[in-house]
Image (cartoon, grey):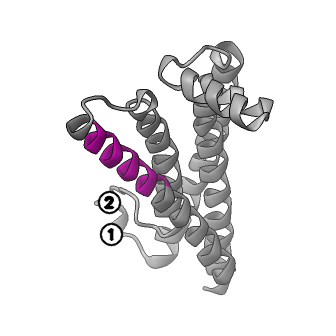
Amino acid sequence: MDRLNRIVAQVFGWGAGLSMMLVFAIIFINSLRRYTVGQSVQWGEELPVYLAAYGVMFGISMAYMQDRHIRFTILIDFLSDQRKTLMFALSDLVMMVTGVLLVLSGLAFLERRGNTMSSGMFGLARWLEKSTGIEAFAALGTLGVYQFSLILGGAMITFAAVLKFVERLIALRGN
């Protein structure tokens, strides 16, 4: 179980790191263009915001897997280790519900507004579609691809909570 949790935390960490690296690279290149050429890339303003949403979702899931998230433990610190583990297991159940609700609200949001055009990304999406012939690139010009971060984030936090819940149940049985 520990090995699986480490692997999942690493995957989440790589996702967060890659997202943040891309955000930095796009902002850096866009800034260089703005000050050297006098104009920035049209999609360079909007894409980092969308990538940051994915980065946050990966980062939150990684923090949950490593138990490094914000936690208020003033009262819990007075409990025995077994009761503390039980309280954390209960919070894992709450996080599972929260993650599922995030997925459901993301799906509803995507269903209603997923086809809305993203003005900053539309030009890039059309250029990618024309230059590669791959029609799927047209989706990058809509908000749906970026709203999907809510669904992915909810699924990842639910998965992280399930893994931590199982880990805590195993710890409770061992005590």
Q: Nearer the viewer, residue 104 or 88?
A: 104
Task: Examine the residues drawn in magenta and state their main secondary structure.
Answer: helix
Check the image and name the residue furthest to the front.
37
Check the image and name the residue furthest to the bottom.
174
Indicate whether 117 appears above or below 13. above
Magenta region includes residue 126 = no
The alpha-carbon separation of the residues under discs 2 and 1 comes to: 6 Å
| Mark identifier at residue 75 | 2
**Residue 146 in the figure: left or right of residue 38:** right
What residue is rendered at 62% in x and 22% in y?
142
Find the magenta span and give its range: 19-33
Helix, strand or loop under label 1: helix
Task: Measuring from the top left, give residue 4's x and y in whole percent.
Answer: 69, 76
How crowded pointer 1 is (Cα within 10 Å; few <14, some 14-19, many 20+) is rated as few
- Do tag 2 and tag 1 residues touch (Cβ < 8 Å)? yes
Task: Measuring from the top left, give residue 119's x and y in whole percent.
Answer: 50, 16
The amino acid at mark 1 is: Phe
Q: Nearer the viewer, residue 48 or 106?
A: 48
Quadrant in the rendering for residue 140 = top right
What residue is rendered at 68% in x and 16% in y?
115
Location of mark 1 (residue): 78
**Residue 98 in the figure: left or right of residue 112:** left
The amino acid at mark 2 is: Leu
* Residue 104 visible in rendering: no
Q: Quadrant of the C terminus?
A: bottom right
